[in-house]
Amino acid sequence: MTITSLKDRIKQGLFLLDGAMGTQLIARGVEVGKCNDYLNIDLPDIVSEIHQVYFRAGSDAVLTNTFGANKYALARHGFGDKVKEINTAAAQIARRAAGGGKYVLGDIGPSGDFLKPLGNLGPEELKDAFAEQANALLAGGVNGFAIQTMTALDEVTIAIEAVKSVSGDLPVSASMAFDKAGDDYRTMMGVDVESAVTKMVSLGVDAVGFNCGTISLDEYVELAGKYVSVVKQLGKDVLIFAEPNAGKPELVDGRAVYRVLPEEFAAAAEKIHSAGVNIIGGCCGTTPEHIRAMCEKFRVSKK
Ligand SMILES: [Zn+2]
């Protein structure tokens, strides 16, 4: 079956992503702290079921269960030599769940370490690691890539360059995680919105975004406005995507709890869209109910 290429599809207007994977795995009995990425190998049915639930809720695309499937993050669980196997399996699981007409984005998260001199990583080896992951996702059939939750400008730069070196015609998006810093927003590594957007756009991504910040929904709406104005100033043809958490996490017994209700999430998504953001999904704490409420709200408002 031929479907519109993802690059063309995301330019046609609103494009809705899925919600959280991690919290859904935990809800299905997966132990906290387990290697979620290895579940693509040892519990593929659970991963597939979560993808299917999001597609039924109305998502146009899901992200592969590969947030921590680069060799450095996997090595912390003893799976550093399983990058190819895990990513290819994850992409195949998501592609099968998608069927025709729906899309799969290969999810690429941070290494969990820092580049030298702050950390142990050299730029070339880090680039190789991200390219290795992207290649394996490609082999499994992804329709595009989502580099996510980045906090350092040097790491996101290397990730984008690595993914673009293997992605061919497929679209590449990149997003960073912002916290509130006084009147402004900065990543954990101190990167402001203008520097983040300007850098990511200069590297030729198809979409720039933000996800997983420890901020409220109203603050996500404000952040969306800031992204839109920086992109406008740059005058580049680039899309913006947003994946807010289900509000600001509260720590209860050492676990992050997200209290935003599906209707509240949907209302914020509508405001983010009105600000000029066309690709919207949910990060931590969002459930199929949040995504369903969002999809329904947009369906009603489009009529
Ligand atoms: Zn998140």
Image (cartoon, rainbow, N blue to C red):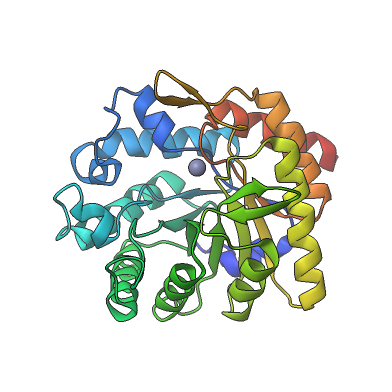
Q: Position of residue 105 (x, y in %)?
A: 47, 57
The vertical placement of 94 against 170, above or below, is above
- Residue at the farthest top position: 253
The vertical placement of 207 against 168, above or below, is above
Residue depicted at x 34% and y 72%: 117
Count of number-bearing discs? 0
Residue depicted at x 29% and y 41%: 36
State the image quarter where residue 277 is shown: bottom right
Q: Position of residue 267 (x, y in %)?
A: 77, 33
Of residues 150 and 181, the one drawn nearer to the viewer in this rendering: 181
Q: Position of residue 199 (x, y in %)?
A: 60, 75
Report whether residue 66 is seen: yes
The vertical placement of 286 against 120, above or below, is above
Report whether residue 296 is seen: no
The vertical placement of 298 against 110, above or below, is above
Q: Position of residue 33 (x, y in %)?
A: 27, 34
- Locate the C terminus by quadrant: top right
State the image quarter where residue 236 is shown: bottom right
Residue depicted at x 62% and y 55%: 186
* 216 displayed left or right of 63: right
